[in-house]
């Protein structure tokens, strides 16, 4: 199965930041599981050396952007030496202009870690003591208030990072979360996912000191710019989303395998020879994973269609409850016995040939004994049932399935390729230096020479924005394919033997009908959200910043897409589990068994009559969001579920 991370982030207790090799595991460990953070000694040395260069530049009086000039369109306004510190304080106060609901705690913690990492590379000229304040906030679980809207993702995520800087410096305008006000999230890990804005309070005197031991703090030259100029909001959104996307893709594979078994589908589509001829590695990996989850399935090995047998018995039993002559009752009872005999043979792997001629003769003779009205009524009830008997063990099974089953390797393989590619880009950005200007050693390398200060555009979020837009397309397609399989499971016209809407006595029962409506609504929304944000741009700052990435918008809608995807896959898991139970006593393969085991642990019943579906849907989505399915796959890997390789560091 998919493994997008090096280690289980829940097991990582301590992350050492050095500016170069932060992994998705590290980000998840800090963002969602509260792992402690420290700065590596070699990074500390670089940070201090970079700060020495800044102080040399300040003393030289040379005009340098961000040290002694205004910002953006005010870049040519020279600032007097006496106002250099005020410049940095004014920067974070003026740029703290965000609006909207507060960001979830895991996003904020990821932002803080990523900002710490990029500044630890030693090119930004910030003081070590300033970075230690970020370390203290993270380790004390202080949760700053950062509004989610306000960044266009070009000169970095200026507004969100400025709100973070208010808390780093202890500015009274900053706000922090009072943890007792809200319950923790339902996600795996202990973090606040949907905080109330009223749960954040301003930094009144002494509050930060009581929370983590930090007092007010004045920024020095270059530090306000170093704290606010970078892509850490959009990159945090990308990192968390890519992790969740891989977990959801794993769940989609389990759901797909279970659905294939539910319809007694063909496994030919997953033959490695087909993938070899296409030449796409990710297609081969998905096909291999599906085959691994279907391995040893007695459902697929059996020639008998158990749901057909059960439907025939149930429908004839319903007729037996009516007032019918004894001869008819005896004939129909023999039909049920014949079905039970076939079911018993199927249980032991034998070919369950029904004696259809005997059944037809018995029923026909019984019908003849009735009067004309009774004959017409009974024929109307029995003809559809008897017709289905011929399909219990068809001599010529389906040659191929519909696209949503047959083309799983092609569609999900393409999605895997996109997620791998985007993941590589996100991890690279996590370890990139993204503020401006950047301070290098002197061109000659001699300590007597002045250092080079280079102004550039590393803060521009286009690499991350485009990656997240690509991921959005992939996620939308995963959801679309899942919804189509859900619809097929409910549609009795496809002759899979499953009852209409996956429930007995459909008609008086609506079964899972509206669950598919919900999936359809979510998939429709996904298609709208998959529209790329990165193709938009609105000039800012008096046209100085005349092209922007809209990366934060790409990231925020990606999170909405993922929430939809989790719900859509959760619905397919629910339907596939219901359908697999109809194949009892035949056993599914490893993927289906894993799903049914989770059903048992979560007390999800086999639905025999209508009940509120949202309660069951919540539990199957919980499998994904709580990573129960992900962990179960890891634990079951040694039992035959194929693991899909990945390229994320």
Image (cartoon, helix red, strand yellow):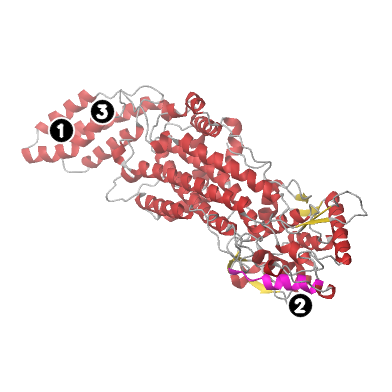
The secondary element bearing badge 3 is classed as loop
Does residue 240 show up? Answer: yes
Task: Estimate the spatial distance between the alpha carbons at disc 1 and disc 3, rounded to whole Å.
Answer: 24 Å
Quadrant of residue 79 within the rendered picture = bottom right
Which residue occupies 75% across, 59% down?
437
Question: Label 1: few (<14), some or many (≥20) within 10 Å?
Answer: some
Secondary structure at numbered mark 1: helix
Give the CA separation, mark 3 to mark 2: 81 Å
Camera-side residue of 232 and 586 = 232
Q: Earlier in the sequence, mark 3 or mark 2?
A: 2
For the point 39% across and 51% down, which residue is it?
Answer: 520
Q: Is residue 156 magenta?
A: no
Outermost bottom residue:
205
In the rendered image, the quadrant that contains the C terminus is: top right
Looking at the image, is mark 1 or mark 2 earlier in the sequence?
A: 2
State which region is magenta: 84-99
Residue 139: percent from the left, percent from the top? 76, 59
The percent coordinates of residue 641 (x first, y second) are: 56, 32
Of badges 3 and 2, the one in the foreground is 2
Q: In this view, does 398 lie to the left or right of 183?
A: left
- Residue in front for this viewpoint, 10 or 344: 10
Q: Name the residue under label 2.
A: 205
- Residue 97 included in the magenta stretch of the image: yes
Packing grade of label 2 (10 A; few <14, some 14-19, many >=20) is: few
Tell me the mark number nearer the camera, choosing from 1 and 3: 3
> Which residue corresponds to mark 3?
390
How far is disc 1 from disc 2 in space, using C-alphas?
A: 92 Å
Q: Which mark is residue 327?
A: 1
Where 55 falls versus 408 (above or below)? Answer: below
Task: Report the mark closest to the observer, 1 or 2.
Answer: 2
Q: Is the magenta stretch mostly helix, strand or loop?
A: helix
Please state the horizontal and vertical placement of residue 234, each as a whole percent of the image.
62, 56
């Amino acid at each position: 199965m998919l493994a997008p991370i090096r280690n289980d982030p829940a097991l990582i207790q301590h992350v050492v930041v050095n500016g170069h090799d932060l992994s998705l595991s590290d980000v998840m460990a800090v963002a969602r599981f509260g792992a402690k953070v420290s700065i590596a000694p070699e990074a500390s040395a670089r940070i201090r050396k970079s700060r020495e260069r800044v102080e040399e530049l300040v003393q030289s009086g040379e005009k340098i952007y961000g040290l002694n000039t205004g910002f953006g369109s005010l870049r040519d306004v020279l600032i007097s030496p006496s106002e250099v510190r005020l410049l940095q304080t004014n920067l974070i106060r003026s740029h703290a202009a965000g609006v909207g609901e507060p960001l979830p705690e895991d996003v904020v913690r990821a932002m803080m870690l990523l900002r710490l990492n990029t500044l630890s590379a030693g090119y930004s000229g910030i003081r070590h003591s300033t970075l230690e304040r970020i370390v203290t906030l993270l380790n004390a679980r202080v949760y700053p208030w950062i509004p989610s809207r306000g960044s266009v993702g070009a000169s970095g995520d200026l507004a969100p990072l400025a709100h973070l800087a208010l808390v780093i410096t202890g500015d009274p305008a900053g706000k922090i979360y009072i943890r007792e006000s809200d319950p923790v999230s339902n996600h795996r890990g202990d973090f606040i996912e949907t905080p109330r804005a009223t749960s954040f309070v301003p930094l009144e005197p002494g509050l930060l000191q009581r929370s983590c031991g930090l007092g007010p703090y004045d920024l020095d030259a270059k530090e306000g710019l170093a704290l606010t100029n970078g892509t850490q909001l959009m990159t945090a959104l990308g990192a968390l989303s890519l992790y969740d996307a891989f977990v959801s893709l794993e769940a989609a594979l389990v759901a797909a395998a279970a659905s294939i078994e539910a319809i007694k589908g063909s496994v030919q589509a997953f033959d490695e020879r087909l993938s070899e001829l296409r030449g796409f590695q990710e297609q081969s990996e998905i096909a291999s994973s599906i085959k691994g989850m279907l391995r040893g399935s007695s459902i697929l090995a059996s020639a008998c269609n158990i749901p057909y047998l059960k439907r025939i018995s149930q429908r004839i039993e319903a007729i037996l409850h009516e007032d019918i002559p004894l001869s008819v009752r005896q004939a129909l009872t023999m039909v049920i016995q014949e079905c039970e005999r076939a079911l018993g043979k199927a249980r032991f792997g034998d070919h369950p040939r029904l004696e259809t001629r005997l059944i037809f003769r018995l029923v026909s003779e019984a019908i003849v004994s009735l009067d004309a009205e009774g004959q017409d009524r009974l024929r109307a009830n029995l003809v559809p049932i008897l017709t289905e008997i011929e399909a219990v063990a068809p001599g010529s099974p389906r040659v191929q399935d519909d696209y949503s089953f047959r083309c799983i390797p092609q569609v999900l393989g393409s999605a895997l390729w996109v997620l791998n590619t985007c993941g590589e880009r996100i991890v690279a950005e996590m370890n990139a230096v993204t503020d401006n200007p950047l301070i290098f050693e002197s061109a000659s390398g001699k300590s007597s020479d002045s250092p080079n200060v280079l102004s550039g555009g590393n803060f521009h979020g286009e690499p991350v924005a485009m990656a997240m837009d690509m991921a959005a397309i992939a996620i939308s397609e995963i959801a679309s394919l899942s919804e189509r399989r859900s619809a097929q499971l409910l549609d009795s016209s496809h002759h899979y033997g499953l009852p209409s809407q996956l429930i007995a006595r459909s008609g008086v029962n609506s079964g899972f009908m509206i669950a598919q409506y919900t999936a359809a609504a979510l998939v429709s929304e996904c298609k709208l959200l998959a529209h790329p944000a990165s193709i938009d741009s609105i000039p800012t700052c008096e046209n100085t910043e005349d092209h922007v990435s809209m990366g934060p918008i790409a990231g925020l809608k990606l999170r909405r897409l993922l929430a939809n995807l989790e719900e859509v896959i959760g619905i397919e898991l629910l339907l596939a589990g219901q359908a697999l139970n109809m194949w009892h006593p035949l056993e599914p393969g490893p993927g289906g068994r894993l799903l049914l085991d989770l059903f048992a642990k979560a007390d999800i019943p086999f639905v025999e009559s209508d009940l509120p579906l949202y309660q069951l849907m919540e539990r199957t989505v919980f499998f994904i969001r709580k990573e129960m399915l992900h962990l179960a796959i890891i634990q079951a890997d040694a039992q035959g579920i194929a693991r899909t390789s990945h390229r994320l560091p």
